[in-house]
Amino acid sequence: MPRKRYTEIRIETHETRRIRFPGKPLAPYCEQCRQHVWAFRPDQVSALLQTTVEDVYRMIDTKRLHLVRIVGGPRLVCGSSPSQGPDFARATKSTVKE
């Protein structure tokens, strides 16, 4: 009996999401990055990363994300947190519209 031949077809997809938040984004100075960065509230970061706010705080505790402090304002997550990787960087850049 002859062997059957199968053809395997792989389809790779790429998904881009644009998430916009009301109001103007903040660009405070981050002491760890040593530059002005886009900063986001923890709930905004959880929407960007499609995770929970608790996971965002866990990432902050384990130094995967770091905070930017604004005098008299809330603690915000640095949009250039380098240890988060390119997915977070792309996500934060796509949300900022000048």
Image: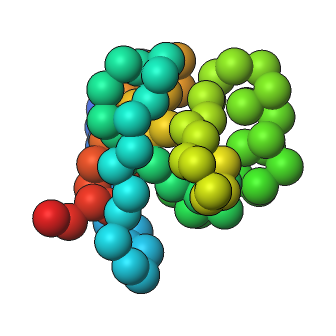
29 to the left or right of 77: left
Q: Residue at x 59, y 41 (%)?
A: 69
Q: Residue at x 38, y 57 (%)?
A: 26
Residue 60 image position (x, y, % from top left):
72, 31
Observer-nearest residue: 37 or 6?
37
The furthest residue to the front: 72
Q: Is residue 91 visible?
A: no
Q: How many marks?
A: 0
Is 1 located above or below residue 57 in the figure?
above
The furthest residue to the bottom: 22
Residue 79 image position (x, y, % from top left):
43, 40
Hey, which quadrant is residue 63 in on the image? top right
Residue 51 image position (x, y, % from top left):
70, 53
The furthest residue to the left: 98
Hey, which quadrant is residue 33 in on the image? top left
Q: Residue at x 61, y 35 (%)?
A: 67
Hey, which quadrant is residue 36 in on the image? top left
Q: How is the image coloured?
A: rainbow
51 to the left or right of 1: right
81 to the left or right of 12: right
Q: Is residue 12 visible?
A: yes
Is 45 located above or below residue 5 in the figure?
below
Observer-nearest residue: 5 or 97?
97
Quarter of the picture holding the C terminus: bottom left
Q: Residue at x 31, y 26 (%)?
A: 35
Is 75 located above or below residue 30 in the figure?
below
Is 60 located above or below residue 95 in the figure?
above
Residue 86 image position (x, y, % from top left):
37, 28
Observer-nearest residue: 36 or 13?
36
